[in-house]
Amino acid sequence: MLTVEKIGGTSMSQFQDVLYNIIIGKRKEGEFYNRVFVVSAYNNVTNWLLEHKKTNEPGVYQKFLNGEDYKADLDKVCQKLISINKGLENVGLQLSEANEFITNRVEQAKTMLSSLSKVLASGYVNAHDIHLAAREILASIGEAHSAWNSTNIINSKGMHAKFVDLCGFDDNEALTIDERITKEFSGTDFKNVICVATGYTKGTEGIMRVFDRGYSEVTFSKIAVDIKADEAVIHKEYHLSSADPNIVGVENCVPVGLTNYIIADQLADIGMEAIHPKAAKPLELSGINIRIKNTFDPDHIGTLISKNYVSPDARVEIVSGSKKMLAIEIHDPLMVSEVGYDAQIMAYFQKYNISYVLKSTNANSITMVIWESNAAEKLLEELKQNFYQVTGVPVALVCAMGTNIATPGFLYRAAKALYENDINIECYAQSIMQVNMQFVVKREHYEKAIVALNKALCN
């Protein structure tokens, strides 16, 4: 069976576990191959190069944008990468070669960024495009570093591994992402080699222009489709579980086991991504199943996401949500029966590039729940200036999801569980497809609501 397997940054930073749990495992001689590993940068490396994903603390990229001394900061990052190399020496990394590779790659990046700075200074180009190009160059460094190291370590263990560098630093070919992947994998004898590919892929369309920090999953997806993989595997530092074990306790949740792409989309919509929805869609259309596995529990088969799975038994598979949400309600007595009223509202959502996660309406009110952000605050202020009565309330969203919950009783049990825990449902939504019951609750009730719904619906 040919598999494409993605390893995330947190797992990569514990590479000894990755090596012995995933790459070697309990395999015997001759069973190591027919696998392509797509690796993310080690934990925090992309944060140093771009900006911190959660706190927005600036990295090298911000220095480039501001015309400051980004080269000095890039040199500091290079030293951090060399320190990471030192920590991998005990698992087989050839230190001098590894340090030489990453030092050369950083120097190449500095040369490219210097050229971009000069072009930018000319004033004859679109600054936005130059900035995006710089972002692509910087992002690629982390994946090149981890992929080269992984290949070197695997080879040191007596296996045959191939470094598949999709970053395009050493060529000037104007290839699309798909074309570059096809070119680099063309002619590969998967039966006799382990391929280790960079999570970043250079392409004329710019992989970060559309996907930004989700680019490694897009590379993973496109490789799987290109080489016609039998299965796509994502290794995470946790199981895809019925609820967050940090909230409900490890003993009160179980791996989901089986679900479908529709549920994966629901999870992505609330920020709990099993896989980026734009990366999942090509796999779904190609009939390739996704398996989510726990790096640190290698004997467990994980959770299989397929196109047509429906649970034979009516059950809630996952309770999840987020407390970083904002509920915006537009109330207007003149809204009743006015065709297209909500289209006026959505024009402002489009202006700020904001989509809603939940929408609920009555005769003269429309409530939409969106992600909390600076753009959301700006949207709220403009809505207040243009509509009769607008309120914005920080809230939490809690969802109960399953492939087979379109039967009587689930809504009753969910509402009863919240009632018995003194949690008021501020707003509610569910589509006719009935795969996701969405409850808006006060933010301070988020954890309690997750526990209550997990206990009532999953246990």
Image: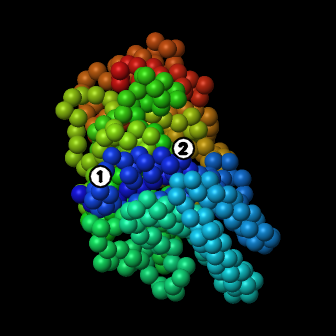
Task: State the image coordinates of residue 177 (x, y, percent, origin top left).
Answer: 43, 74
What is the distance, in whole Å, between disc 2 and disc 1 at their CAs? Answer: 50 Å
Furthest residue toward top: 420
- Labelled disc at residue 77: none
Task: State the image coordinates of residue 188 (x, y, percent, origin top left).
Answer: 32, 74
Label 1: which secondary element: loop
Residue type beneath disc 2: Ile
Q: Relative to the observer, which residue lies in front, 395 or 113?
A: 113
| Residue at 59% from the left image edge and 67% from the top image edge | 98
Colouring used for the render: rainbow
Residue 429, compared with residue 25, is above or below; it is above
Q: Name the residue carrying label 2.
A: 370
Task: State the image coordinates of residue 387 (x, y, percent, origin top left).
Answer: 60, 45
Residue 57 seen: yes
Q: Is residue 442 left or right of residue 199?
A: right
At label 2, counting other C-alpha atoms closer than 10 Å, the crowd grade (few under 14, some 14-19, many 20 or more) is many
User: Are dots 2 and 1 in contact, CB under 8 Å?
Assistant: no
Res 412 → quadrant: top left
Q: Is residue 304 left or right of residue 17?
A: left
Q: Name the residue carrying label 1.
A: 28
Sequence-first tag of 2 and 1 = 1
Residue type beneath disc 1: Lys
| Residue at 25% from the left image edge and 33% from the top image edge | 404
At label 1, counting other C-alpha atoms closer than 10 Å, the crowd grade (few under 14, some 14-19, many 20 or more) is few
Residue 97, compared with residue 218, is above or below; it is below
Furthest residue toward right: 68
Label 2: which secondary element: strand
| Residue at 62% from the left image edge and 53% from the top image edge | 87
Q: Nearer the viewer, mark 2 or mark 1?
A: 1
